[in-house]
Image (cartoon, rainbow, N blue to C red):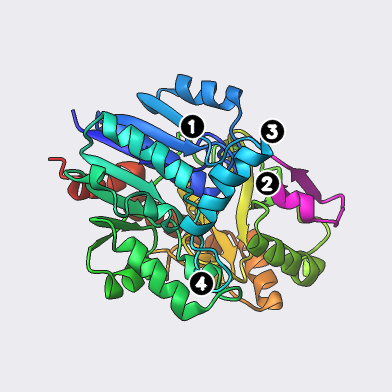
Amino acid sequence: MKKVLFFMPDNPLKKNAGNRTRALSMLSYFKSRNFEIDFVSEYYTGRWDETDIKVFKQSGLADNTYVIKKKPSKKNILYYLLFYKLPNFFYSNKAWFFPLQFPELVTLRFKRAFKKILAEKKYDYIFINYASWATLVEHNPLTKGAVTVIDTHDFITAQLQRKVNIGQSFKEEIRRISLFDIALAISVEEQYIFSQFCKNKVALAPMMLNKPESIGVIAEKSFDLIYVASDNVHNQKSANWFFKEVYPLLPANVQICVIGQINEHLTIKAPNITSVNFVEDLATYYQNAKVALCPMLTGTGTKIKVVEALSYGMPVVCNTRGIDGLIDKNNNGCLVSDDAVEFKNNIMQLLTDDSAYQKQAENALATFNLNYEKEQCYKNLDTIFGIV
């Protein structure tokens, strides 16, 4: 039985963001291939509590679970300052005269705890999520003999381009990704960028989802449009654009369901808008809607909500950023426009033209089955992880 040490700072069972869904799908893959899985996370970053830890342990996703605190309690402030804050200040290279220009989330305390886990067992694979945690394997002799893998999730420099020196940030991101034997890119764009500069193996590992058990079983849909979004800054900006520029152009009888924490940032209230902050399972809502929305003006990486919609054979209306990461850019079930009037027209075409709708629905399902269906993606991962 192969052994994998899997680090993910967030709780994968809190499926309210694409990055958590991604980690959950990777854990499920290793479980399906009979890996022995040791799961490591960070208490504060993942917003864990004791109930969360218990539920995760009972989920069966991992054989052993370690949720580590990257910093001590502040109850003893002198201990906190002398044995955590001051040493970590220099370890993280955050002195004013040496700005890193790239997020370093690994603390000295956490790295020591991570090494302690490594010292207790030999692993075949060490799997790290995010370049901002990549230094867990840097200068770490305990990783010797294991294949190190990073799941990049995103192109972080592009996300931070207005906050950092782009050249220094990009150089550091490439350096961190190059620390690993294998780098997984979720999108074709990121695979291309990373493979041009990294000397290690950069493999495409697109988002993978289960094929829904039933598609289109509800004859009369409750919603014309479904919009699923978390509360990150990109979604906030994009949602504001949609409801300010596009929504007023739509007929008042078009029913819209908005799902996710993005609702906390929306002030618009109307009889044709249904707001749902969180649902455990989106399946019922997708089956009960006709068209998915993905207004995205900024951001990078594959939009998980787009792939989810495609899995239900649901056409998507989006901006150019909405198809970022998709392997097929054309005939993929998405109607794309950055102009508010054209965006509205794309929506209305799908809601009023049955033949146009059917064509896009067929394209959506074909795109999903070919590129993102779980079993198809598992075959690709089998090649990467040497499973015959």
User: How far apart, in angstroms, are the residues tagged by discs 4 and 3?
Assistant: 30 Å
Q: Quadrant of the N terminus?
A: top left
**Position in image of residue 242 (x %, y %):** 73, 66
| Residue 220 placement: quadrant | top right
What's the mark number on residue 260? 2
- The amino acid type found where label 3 is placed reads Lys
Seen at 51% across and 51% down, the residue is 87
Q: Which residue in the structure is indicated by mark 3?
A: 75
- The amino acid type found where label 2 is placed reads Gly
If you read the primary sequence from the N terminus, does the residue marked by circle 1 or circle 2 appear first?
1
**Position in image of residue 376 (x %, y %):** 29, 47
Crowd band around label 2 with a 10 angstrom C-alpha radius: few (<14), some (14–19), many (20+): some
If you read the primary sequence from the N terminus, does the residue marked by circle 1 or circle 4 appear first?
1
Say if mark 4 contacts mark 3, CB within 8 Å.
Answer: no
If you read the primary sequence from the N terminus, does the residue marked by circle 2 or circle 3 appear first?
3
Question: 372 above or below 321?
Answer: above
- The amino acid type found where label 1 is placed reads Val
Determine the secondary structure under disc 3. Answer: loop
Q: Which residue in the structure is indicated by mark 4?
A: 98
- The amino acid type found where label 4 is placed reads Phe
What's the mark number on residue 67? 1
